[in-house]
Image: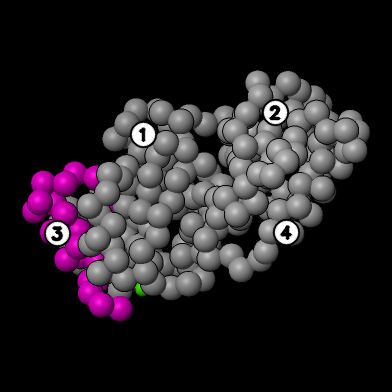
Amino acid sequence: MPTDDIKILLVEDDDRIRREICGALTSAGFDVAVSVSAHDARNALFRKLDLVVLDLGLPDGDGLDICRDLRAAGNSVPVLILTARDAPDQRVLGLDAGADDYVIKPFHVPELVARVRTLLRRAHGTVAAGPLRADDVWADPESRSAGRGDARFDLKPREFDLLVFLLRHPGRAWTRVQLLDRVWGIDYDGDERTVDSHVRRLRAIVEDDASDPRFIETVWGVGYRWRSP
Ligand code: CA
């Protein structure tokens, strides 16, 4: 199953943590929706989801209740709980409430992504991983490295994320707003020129001739696309 078909709901009220996790899961290629409260989460859970990352301490409720209610309703979506409560009995309560795994705050985001993959593998079989390729251009989301043939690119984090996103969807045109949402995240406040400046830098690195790009095409009146395979 390709990662961008995998829908993850992230329930977290803390802005900084939510942004960090959302960014990491999005760059790992997952389709991420966010909820900032228990009320939001209960509405979002009606959608078809592949995994839920659930904070326990929400402003209007306890994540444990959400998890218990999900299971009581017969929903078996994998749930990874985030808890700041380090007491062992809280972890046990989470697992008793039907969670599949837990991560204790503060945590390393790559560890959380690894646990997400493990849960998805358990639920769906193998999740596609490994380098993405188009001609001799490649990008490896796991090691966050990219290059052309044997030459490595020196990319800033967001340039890397943009390259990975475009490589995952060859031939598909994206508007600047869509790219901002999907690569920078819905919480990002920048404007569409941010996309243009990143495309410019990426072309200077990836293309033989940035003024006549072979890979990252401008789609007039729309935005950009990685050329068709
Ligand atoms: Ca919280």
Residue that label 3 marks: 68
Q: Which mark is residue 121?
A: 1
Please name the residue shown 53% across and 65% down the image.
187
Residue that label 4 marks: 194
Instruction: Find the residue positioned furthest to the front.
Output: 221
Q: Mark 1 against mark 2, which lies toward the viewer?
A: 2
Q: Mark 3 against mark 2, which lies toward the viewer?
A: 2
Residue that label 2 marks: 227
Q: CA distance from mark 4 to mark 3?
A: 42 Å
Please indicate whether residue 74 sits to the left or right of residue 4 in the image: left
Q: Which mark is residue 26?
A: none
Instruction: Find the residue positioned furthest to the bottom.
Output: 59
Q: Amino acid at mark 1?
A: Arg
Q: CA distance from mark 4 to mark 1?
A: 35 Å
Indicate the quadrant containing the C terminus: top left, top right, bottom left or bottom right. Answer: top right
Q: CA distance from mark 3 to mark 1?
A: 23 Å
Residue 17 visible, this orientation: yes
Label 2, secondary structure: give it: loop
Pointer 4 or 1: first along the chain: 1
Frontmost residue, 151 versus 73: 73
Q: Is residue 161 magenta?
A: no
Label 1, secondary structure: give it: helix
Pointer 1 or 2: first along the chain: 1
Mark 2 is surrounded, within 10 Å at the Cα level, by few (under 14), some (14 to 19) or many (20 or more) other residues, namely some
Q: CA distance from mark 2 to mark 4?
A: 21 Å
Q: Is residue 64 magenta?
A: yes
Pointer 4 or 3: first along the chain: 3
- Percent from the top left, x then y, of residue 171? 63, 28
Q: Quadrant of residue 36?
A: bottom left
- Ligand 1 rendered quadrant: bottom left
